[in-house]
Image (cartoon, coloured by chain):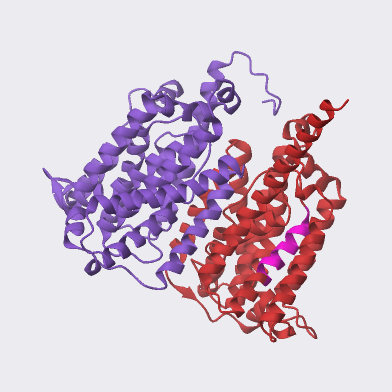
Chain colours: A red, B purple
Amino acid sequence: MKALRNLPGWETTLVVLVVVALLGGGVLSKDFLTGQNLSFLTANFSEILLMALTMTLLVIVAEIDLSVASILGLCSAVLGVLFAAGVPMPLAILAAFVVGGLAGLLNGLLVTRLGLPSLAVTIGTLALYRGLAYVLLGDRAIADFPQAYTNFGFGTVPGTLIPIPIALGTVLAVVTAVVLHATPFGRSLYAIGANEVAARFSGLRVERTKLLLFVMSGLMSALAGIVYTFRFASARGDNATGFELGVIAAVLLGGVSIFGGRGSVVGAVLAVFLIGLINGALTIVDVSNEILTIVTGLLLIGSVLVPNLVARVQAARQRRRLRGNTVSP
Amino acid sequence: MTRSDPAPATPVTPGLLTRLLRAREAGLVGLLLLVTLGTAAINPLFLGAGSVRDLFLNVAIIALLVVGETIVLLMKHVDLSISSVVGLSAFLTGSLFATHPDLPIPLALLFGLALGTVLGAVNGLLVAYGRVPALVATLGTLYVFRGVTYAVVHGGQINASNLPAAFLGFGTGSVLGIPNLVLLVVVIMLGFGAYLGSWRGGREYYALGSNAEAAVLAGISVTRRTMTGFVLSGAIAGLAGVLYLARFGTVDATAGTGLELQVIAAAVVGGVSINGGVGTLFGAGIGALLLGVMGSALVTLRAPGFYQQAIQGALLLGAISVDMLVARRTAKHLQAAPDHPGRTK
């Protein structure tokens, strides 16, 4: 799999693309590059940013979690129902984390104990957790959260225009990057993704690692659910439906290989910003939501297809070169 | 899904259970009868003529889609985009009728087939030639096709009043008491059942899903077969879109959303393995029927609609877990000495 991704500089390319998206937005509208607008725009992908961090780790070990947006919705519903029942907010938030962790644990147990493909498991739990969110809330919405908490959702870091959830996501991204790129645990993830059998033989605890990652993914989705609930000051069963696509698109576009064993946190984070900015720029030119859906879908396909095609072209060239060599001694 | 037997004479041994599970279809039929009779005992209306007819009409569309999904699952791939193909096909067929009210019904069916073929070919090209994993490719096209539908629909809607009476009659009519749609789907299922069971092309899907390398060595063109599988899945979904329009008469941009989950659940519950190479259309059809019966049983028993999705997800998880356990047990029987690296029990 010699591909575009292996070349050092996919992250650099993404940085260039982010700058191009910024400039493009600026050309489209002079209001695009104002701090206010960018602050507003980035706040919109807070949850995707958070969930993309744990998704990066999962995809590196060649697993996937399609249930993240449903866990987000379920935790949002738990938070809303408990708050409406008069439970103190800190306890309701704790309960949301517990539910998210348990949801991730169920995913992880089904994958590691039964050896089921994570794709199949998390398609099932995507429906199950979303269904449970509806069971809890039906089509009701819980609003009227205390101002102190909703401020956390749509406030900015004092003295700056950085939305609080994005600041939180950035801190967590740094932590994730350090764990992935500078600890033995992080290195072991690459080993597992590159060759699971070899990793097992070298004594890595593959099952335990994967279980841990699924639980982390559940906890992160719970955090995203709490952020989403406060950002929109509304807990609903259908909160963030379909967000899993955005998360996976960002992770793959960020250079994390769907086949496992390759990728970086920086790439995934840059891709989240890139997709967010493209969407923001397109919204300015009044491109409707349906086009955004198409663009995200195409980015998802393209981020896997293009490296594959590049790899094939390179392989063909290599073969021709070799053939050429045999002709001329 | 617990059942309390009136104290069986002997406890059910694992061996018997395994045998039952292996005869997957037999077990499914038994469960089907149990759910049907149990619900009817509580509420006799469940087996009323009208409700049975509605049930079969609802199952018909899922059962048709299961045919295409089974072909793809057999190859160890997955097609998540079928719901979007159904939506686009239903809406475009409706628009076609709105502008050409005198369009013959067979032509409308052909149009759906052709549209589905094109969309399926997109998936096939991505997976077979672009080497994009089917999950990524069809998750992408699920959104792209749905986005195209939104763009075409532009907040509009097709209503029964836009459709010619003949077409609506086709959707609601029946022959000898059997609804047209059900008849059509049964004929298609029988045809594909024969194709998958005893035609060379049909058997190749099994070969591909069981062992791709061996299939190559056996001289099967993997790319061509994969392409064909996705094209068939798309074409069937396109046809299902026309039937969806005939059945419901009202279609908006969200038509068919979420169908892919029900279809995959039906196939897996019916014994089609998500790991490829295992499953029959008969089983998949029974799986679709079972899920349909459970759905309407819930409605009959006054369970809130909000429970539907959770139950579907739980069923899917249960089915794949059972599937895996059975597969492992079978593998253990086949292997005298398991020499797998991994956890030592």
Which residue is located at x 44 percent, y 56 percent?
B84
Q: Is residue A98 visible?
A: no
Residue A6 rendering spot, x and y as whole percentages: 80, 47
Question: Residue lying farthest left?
Answer: B176
Q: Quadrant of the N terminus of chain A?
A: top right
- Front-lying residue, A191 or A9: A9
Which residue is located at x 59 percent, y 21 percent?
B217
Q: Which residues are magenta?
A: A264-277
Q: Is residue B149 visible?
A: yes
Which quadrant of the structure image shows residue B11? top left
- Front-lying residue, B120 or A33: B120
Residue A19 rendering spot, x and y as whole percentages: 77, 71
Q: Check residue A319 for magenta coloring.
A: no
Q: Is residue A112 above or below residue A285?
A: above
Which quadrant of the structure image shows residue A96? bottom right
Residue A297 rendering spot, x and y as whole percentages: 57, 59
Which residue is located at x 75 percent, y 71 percent?
A20
Query: What secondary structure is the stretch in magenta mostly built from?
Result: helix
Q: Is residue B298 above or below residue A92?
A: above
Please give left or right for residue A98 compared with residue B321 in the image. right
Please give left or right for residue A209 compared with residue B29 in the image. right
Residue A169 rendering spot, x and y as whole percentages: 74, 67
Q: Is residue B8 above or below residue A32?
A: above
Q: Is residue B49 above or below residue B279?
A: below
Which residue is located at x 72 percent, y 58 percent?
A53
Question: Residue lying farthest top?
Answer: B336
